[in-house]
Image (cartoon, grey):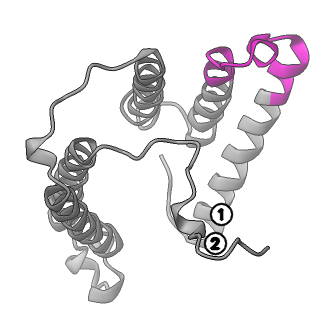
Amino acid sequence: MTTPAGTDPEAAPSAEPPIPARNDLRDAIGWIVFGLVVLVGSVTMDRLERQHINPYTVPGLLPGILGLAMIVLGGVLALRSLRRGALGQRREPPDADRREERRRIWVVTTLCVGYGVVLVGHGLPFWAASTIYVTGSILVLQRISRDADERRLGPRVIVKALVIGAASALVTHAVFQDLFLVRLP
């Protein structure tokens, strides 16, 4: 596709307004804090030294690297937002779309925390907890969809969510147990 002479395709107006620098700064702080939590968790994990495990295969190595990456990338985002004047911007009140977006984020966060804190590790087998989580997440997120047709939860939709939930749980369980040799709760 060619553009007319003298126009910049990058400067074309986008459908979405740019994200305010203040929001980027808030997100950056969240990523840095989350990265620190992951890093601390990975450092405090059992190193399995009593079992003579190779130090490069210890359980906390990959999460530690990912935690460091989150910290670094959060720092880059924070610096970028500070250069864009994040501290000098006023906080604008959220509009209806922004409030709906926040509500969806809280719903997803609640589902994830519920899975990690309530379902996994409290007597239910991993595959059952994961089936409940994936099926429930599909149904809840479909129920709060913006599209009225998608909000209808008929028997076909429920069966489809259950099949997806069970299949994803069983595949995840099989991959971790049989391929990665990780014993799941």
Left or right of residue 79: residue 130: right
x and y, in percent, of residue 85 in the image: 14, 52
Left or right of residue 21: residue 86: left
The residue range painted magenta reads 139-160
Residue 119 counted in the magenta span: no
x and y, in percent, of residue 25 in the image: 20, 49
Residue closest to the eye, 180 or 27: 27
3 versus 88 height, above or below: below
x and y, in percent, of residue 83 in the image: 15, 62
| Residue 179, disc | 2
Q: Which residue is mark 1?
A: 175
- Asked which secondary structure carries label 1, the reply is helix
Q: Are marks 1 and 2 in contact (CB under 8 Å)?
A: yes
The amino acid sitting under disc 1 is Val
x and y, in percent, of residue 143 in the image: 67, 15
Which quadrant is home to the N terminus? bottom right
Residue closest to the eye, 178 or 134: 134
User: Can residue 54 be seen in this snapshot?
Assistant: no
Q: How many marks?
A: 2
User: Can residue 139 be seen in this snapshot?
Assistant: yes
